[in-house]
């Protein structure tokens, strides 16, 4: 099968999941054509596979007035004007900005005889696929990775023409069924994102912290206020004040490549006098993340909201005891006290207490290491996403 695989701003710092899924699809014998809107900022291109990914990616986002005019001429007779009126000015603006890319996608799909296009987004990439479909491109599908409010206007238009959509949590499925009733495709399988559990496997046993040695914490996530890194820093300050010797490393960068929210985190770090205890590592590749996980005693991510959490999965796959927040869909991954620990978001004091309590209980650490790994291996392997995608495309076409 020839599949167009459309990901916005590929390859970004959190896109290791997409790359794994592409490789899994190819391992199954399918021909994957990688498509994207545009390249991410240079400061966010950090993976050892990024150059290979960019070489094989066709970017559709460069504006072309001729392509846009051709697309508009083809779409107006097919009801686009009516959708613009119904969905409002925000959708009309997004549609206008997407016309050129949609025309390029339709042309590419014909030239390469694509059988199906999957948009790993419900934002503008989904709109491009939906517009291209109305211009003769093959069937398309979507994946919803977070709340609908994160993905802009025109959701009914994007979902109405889709052959199917995969959704990463039951919580999000409920939101979609409530908000978009009457505009949904017939099949909406819940399929969480996954991780490469073969690569994310320990080659040495997990060891709890030794008495008299620092407690090593690791966090991985975009430098954005909703990831809660500032709350984790505040928890570290409390632990230090309580006499717990702790070191924290945070991998990830802000969306501006280091000139955005990172500056606020650096100021917060200095205000708390944590320069000797907290390091911001920037965007690092998957191999470096694996090494940091091997060294960590506990993985902590204090997100205010998290649709599910690939970073949690990676830590659990590596057998690192994991503390997360009971926010968004995280509860569908972490079962509190069984394979990880959940705390309230925006509560540094509770976070500090949980870190301290867990770090002083070697038996609990070893149990969470084993249970977390087993849970991810059973339910959150990257190959499951590729298998679901192929099953749904085949069902659609048969």
Image (cartoon, rainbow, N blue to C red):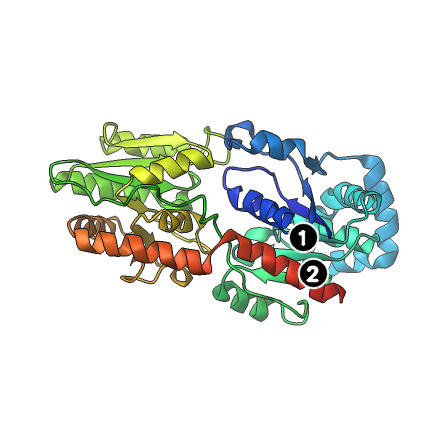
- Residue 25 rendering spot, x and y as whole percentages: 62, 50
Instruction: Please name the residue shown 77% across and 46% down the image.
Output: 102
Residue at image mark 1: 118
- Residue 123 rendering spot, x and y as whole percentages: 62, 50
Q: Secondary structure at mark 1?
A: strand
Q: Is residue 40 left or right of residue 108?
A: left
Q: Is residue 155 visible?
A: no
Please say if 75 is above or below 62.
below
- Neighbor class of circle 2 (other Cα within 10 Å; few <14, some 14-19, many 20+) is many
Residue at image mark 2: 393
Instruction: Indicate which label's residue lies in the foreground, 2 or 1.
Output: 2
Please say if 97 is above or below 49.
below
Front one among 209 and 10 = 209
Q: Is residue 40 left or right of residue 297?
A: right
Front one among 229 and 162 = 162
Instruction: Please name the residue shown 12% across and 42% down the image.
Output: 242
């Amino acid at each position: 099968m020839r599949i167009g695989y459309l990901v916005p701003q590929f390859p970004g710092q959190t896109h290791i999941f997409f790359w794994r899924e592409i490789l899994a699809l190819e391992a199954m014998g399918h021909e994957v054509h990688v498509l994207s809107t545009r390249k991410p900022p240079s400061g966010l291109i950090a993976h050892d596979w990024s150059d290979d990914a960019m070489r094989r990616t066709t970017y559709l986002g460069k504006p072309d007035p001729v392509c846009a005019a051709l697309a508009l001429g083809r779409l107006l007779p097919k009801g686009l004007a009516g959708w613009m009126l119904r969905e409002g000015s925000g959708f009309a603006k997004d549609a206008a900005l997407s016309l050129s890319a949609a025309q390029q996608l339709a042309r590419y799909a014909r030239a390469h005889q694509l059988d199906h296009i999957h948009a790993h987004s419900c934002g503008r990439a989904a709109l491009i696929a939906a517009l291209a479909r109305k211009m003769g491109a093959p069937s398309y599908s979507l994946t919803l990775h977070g709340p609908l409010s994160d993905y802009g206007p025109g959701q009914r238009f994007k979902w109405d023409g889709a052959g199917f959509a995969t959704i990463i949590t039951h919580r999000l499925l409920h939101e979609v069924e409530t908000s978009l009733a009457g505009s949904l495709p017939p099949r909406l399988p819940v399929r969480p994102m996954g991780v490469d559990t073969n690569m994310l496997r320990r080659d040495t046993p997990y060891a709890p912290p030794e008495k008299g040695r620092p407690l090593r914490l690791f966090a991985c996530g975009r430098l954005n206020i909703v990831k809660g890194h500032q709350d984790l820093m505040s928890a570290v300050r409390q632990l230090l004040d309580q006499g717990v010797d702790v070191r924290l490393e945070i991998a990830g960068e802000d969306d501006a490549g280091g000139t955005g929210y990172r500056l606020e985190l650096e100021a917060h770090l200095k205000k708390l006098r944590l320069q000797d205890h907290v390091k911001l590592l920037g965007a690092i590749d998957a191999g470096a993340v694996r090494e940091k996980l091997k060294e960590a005693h506990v993985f902590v991510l204090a997100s205010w909201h998290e649709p599910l959490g690939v970073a949690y999965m990676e830590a659990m796959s590596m057998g690192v005891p994991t503390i997360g927040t009971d926010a968004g869909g995280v509860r569908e991954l972490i079962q509190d006290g069984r394979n990880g620990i959940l705390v309230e978001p925006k509560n540094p004091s509770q976070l500090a207490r949980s870190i301290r309590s867990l770090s002083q209980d070697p038996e609990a650490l070893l149990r969470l290491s084993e249970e977390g790994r087993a849970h991810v291996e059973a339910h959150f392997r990257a190959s499951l996403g590729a298998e679901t995608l192929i099953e749904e495309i085949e069902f659609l076409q048969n």
